[in-house]
Amino acid sequence: MTPFNERIIEALETPELRSNLRGAMDFLRSKRSLSIEDYALWQQHQDIATDVRHALPQQLPELLEQLEQSCTRNGIEVHWAADASDARKIFLQIAQATNATRVIKGKSMASEEIELNTHLEQHGIESTESDMGEFIVQLANEKPSHIIMPALHKNQEQIAELFNQKLNEKADASDVDQLIGIGRKVLREKFKQADIGVSGVNFAAAKSGTLCLVENEGNGRLSTSVPNCHIAIMGIDKVIPDLSSLPSLLYLLTRSATGQEITSYVNLISGPRKPDELDGPKSVHLIILDNGRSSIASDPALAATLACIRCGACMNHCPVYTKIGGHAYGTTYPGPIGQVISPQLDGGEEHNELLNACSLNGACGEACPVNIELPDMIRELRNQRSAAQPNHTGEKMVWHAWRAIHQSPRLYQLTSLMMRIPGLSSLLFPRRWTKGRTSPTPANNTLHALIKAKTNHDNRDPQHEHK
Amino acid sequence: MNTNSQNAREKILERLRLASRAAARKKPDIQKKERISIQDNPLSKPLSLRDQLQKNRFEVIVVRNETLPQILSAIVEEIDESRPLSWLLGNGAVNNSIVDHLQKIDRQTAHQFDQPFETLKDSIFNDIDIGLTHCESVIKNTGTLVIQPSADEPRTLSLIPPIHVIIANKAVVFDSLDGYFAQEIELSLIEHSNLIFVSSPSKTADIQQKLAYGAHGPKRVIVVLSDQQLNEE
Ligand code: SF4
């Protein structure tokens, strides 16, 4: 059994995880659908955002250069990282140049991607996650299981228990306000002491050199305002031409992610503290990270995934994610979008296997606010992958037979007849499949026969037309 | 930029240029979703500015012709705390005069953000109860207040103290974010290296999807508007 299969089974055999996931998914889905009150307006914004985001693969080189120029003009120092190791080196150089020993982090998936925390710890730099969900996950020595709600796999009791153990606090499992109060208290100290604040970037406007950050808690604002130095890490795909499309992008992002009309804070940063200002970081650095994205741009089958605004809707609507949760995927980005981009971003053949975790139901494509056709991509990737594996003769024979049967009505009838011979059909289902399931019993009459009978009946019934 | 970063830059841009040329030759159609026309939901009628702000959990104070001391008393009344309260304000003539008036109200002490953050850091984190800022633009349909930190009113004023008071009775009201971005954003960006769109007190639902306020930023936000802005007669 592959490690991926093992993780799936482990997840499915943990009832607490399944009920936590169910609760979280129901919550996020219903909030999202309630937030789309005016569908015409939704479609208008969707058109604008889709056009801007899908034009990206072609415009990337110009936009990134423009972003670099504008940021530099604004006093933001720009660095380029071809891969995770580049990004870690750049980060460490900045940290060491300023003798930084403590880092406070706002939510950033790009920093997860480069495994920043582990790297900093190895170099004696303390790195603390300040988003409540990320903080919980870090305390538990885990990774986020969702890109928007990192700790959704844990319930209140588990979190209180964690706070009791790790923070030596008398946490009351029945009182969420108290739990959040504990997090606030602990993290305020960390904000005060931090030398560097880290953030991700939701969108970066090339024309004005503006970084846009979206959040509810205020930890992102604190991370980017209190420490002396702010380092933002962004994938190259976060760039947008200018701020004119931002209202549409925000409209879709916050509704799709958490069902909010807008987040508590939208933070636009265009530079460090000015000479006459009294607070704000004295230096702002932007690390532009490729890490596989340029190969995605070069692959016509995948390029559209660069349009992704990381809202998480595709995972919230995926029947597989809903059952197994984010950890089972073993990647930075789980769920449908993760299945498609992880082989490129995280590298390694083993992530190709993630494509199996899909029932081709199409829900992710329906949910995606920027029209990324994830189901088509998953199908296309499966196709490519099976073409690269010519040895599956058994599977090939089955599909050849399947095609022959479905192309000839006579053969089709014959097989349906045979399927109804008692005992024969169960032979056709693989043992491994029927071990945990009852093999389906064929109906007494075939669909053909039923339709025929109905047509005959309708023809005999003159009232039918008026019904 | 060091040589490593410079090399990475060339490598990334080169690959993207190749990809971009290939993409230009073979431009894929974006498959937009099928249009569904749905009757407008009568429940989705936009709320009034006051209702939208209150829905977002702002505490709204409406003023008509009140004098500054009267407005400040109304705010203190809304805050409704019996303990002594410590305020932090920005600089400039307007803030100076607010400080003068606040000092005259029972149990209120007002300080000004008149030194670099590093000097004031501990006291801002530990001693200040209320930060006060002004606001020049309000967005109606999302219930958003645009805060523009400046030399006079620094960034952390609206962020670290547990209560944030926003004086917005002179602000221009925009219908939507689109309107604000179309008319205002370019100018604001030139003048301010940081712009914050505040649409509720700080909050989180990271613990089992249960909503809690005062996650890292202010737990309460009090907004002062004028009756003209609300246009409610
Ligand atoms: S692929 Fe679409 S639905 Fe999934 S995270 Fe990206 S934008 Fe959201």
Image: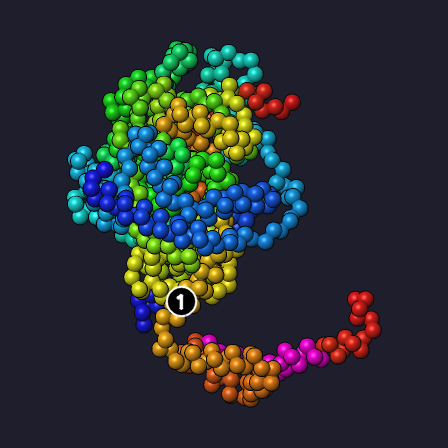
Kindly identify which chain the residue marked by label 1 belongs to.
A
Q: Is residue A213 visible?
A: no
Residue A360 percent location from the top left of the image: 48, 64
Residue A334 percent location from the top left of the image: 38, 56
In the visual, does B23 lie left or right of A78?
A: right
> For residue A236, what is the image quadrant?
top left
Q: Which residues are magenta?
A: A437-453
Question: Looking at the picture, does residue B48 appear above or below residue A422?
Answer: above
The type of residue carrying mark 1 is Gln
In the picture of the structure, the residue carrying the numbered disc 1 is: A384
The one of A176 and A63 positioned closer to us in this rendering: A63
Q: Does residue A448 belong to the magenta stretch?
A: yes
Q: Is residue A303 visible?
A: yes
Q: Residue at x 28, y 44 (%)?
A: B9
| Total numbered labels placed on residues in the image | 1
Residue A108 percent location from the top left of the image: 33, 44
Q: Secondary structure at mark 1?
A: helix
Question: Looking at the picture, does residue B59 appear above or below residue B90?
Answer: below
Q: Residue at x 62, y 81 (%)?
A: A446
Residue A401 percent location from the top left of the image: 49, 82
The image quadrant where one finds the N terminus of chain A is bottom left
The image quadrant where one finds the C terminus of chain A is bottom right
Q: Does residue A156 belong to the magenta stretch?
A: no
Cβ at disc 1 under 8 Å from ligand 1: no
The one of A353 and B190 positioned closer to us in this rendering: B190
Q: Residue at x 40, y 81 (%)?
A: A394
